[in-house]
Amino acid sequence: MKVNISGYWQLSPLTDLSIPQGDLQFPGALSQILPETLSEATIAEQEWHLMHDFELTEHELSHPAVDLVFSGIDYFAEVRVNGVAVMDCDGSEVTYRKEVRPHLQLGRNRIEVLFLEYDEEDLLVDEEAATPQCSLGVMSPENDPRMGIWHLPYLQFIPHVRLEYVAMEQIWHHGGGCEFKVDLYYKTYRSGLLSASVKFNGMTYSLPIDVRKQQVSALFQVEAPRYTDPKQPNSDDVYPLYVELDGQEQTLDVVLNRSLCATHCPL
């Protein structure tokens, strides 16, 4: 179950306290409620505090895992949940995802986003090393250059298993055509009868999930692949890959090229 964090956020200045506070909604730029005398460059040079309150029910908190997901942030920002810093948005990823179930409570909760001056020493470090992301073959969206949040953040409530990451492999044949292999890696929290849906090139596989394992695979035959340059991909030659598992949905853009082998996409 995915719940968008919609509604108004309170924006407060941290650098120039003479700037008035205000409420705004995302997606959008901070400048939408700031004085017109402030240029986008001036806004980007200052530090800002965003705050949003939301309610959680007993049913929502009954899920064994809850992920907080942010994307569309191109400036350094620290994200806090009920006063606890949970993740940094430092430009290294397209999407930032963090398990926040231990920090949530019944009733009112608060999320804060602090746009701060970048300091590498203040970066949060996960206890477990993050899996490096290979972006070959995956096209990243371009955001508005103004300071703001350009995609609506959301909470992903996970009933049984979390989709951890997707691995893709291109297997090219000497006589023409190729096979496209998709591996889904997941973490189980609660047992249940589950299946994953994987759609590519007009074909959909429904894959039963064995909660005793951590991986499931799908293999697609591509008889006449649309061959394109991954450095300068043509949008007409991009294949959308759609994955759904336990209410979690991901759509990835894929290009086929003999120079590509494996692509790992942590989620």
Image: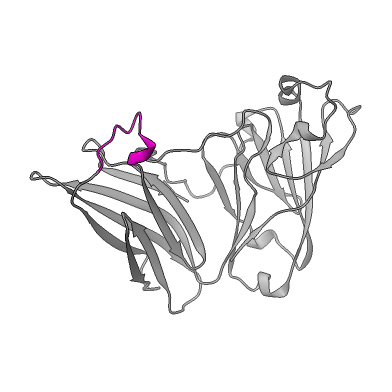
Q: Which residue is drawn at 61% across and 36% down?
A: 123
When asked about the image quadrant of residue 43, the answer is top right
**Image side of residue 214 versus residue 127, left or right:** left
Question: Is residue 262 located in the magenta-colored stretch of the structure?
Answer: no
Q: Is residue 158 above or below residue 7?
A: below
**Image side of residue 107 versus residue 97, left or right:** right
Image quarter where the N terminus lies is bottom right
Residue 83 rendering spot, x and y as whole percentages: 76, 50
Q: Tell how many labels.
A: 0
Residue 181 rendering spot, x and y as whole percentages: 27, 54
Question: Is residue 235 located in the magenta-colored stretch of the structure?
Answer: yes
Q: Is residue 212 above or below residue 80?
A: below
Residue 153 rendering spot, x and y as whole percentages: 64, 50
When asked about the image quadrant of residue 46, the answer is top right
Q: In the depicted view, which residue is nearer to us: 125 or 184?
A: 184
Q: Is residue 247 above or below residue 85?
A: below
**Image side of residue 152 versus residue 177, left or right:** right
Residue 170 rendering spot, x and y as whole percentages: 24, 47
Magenta span of residues: 226-237
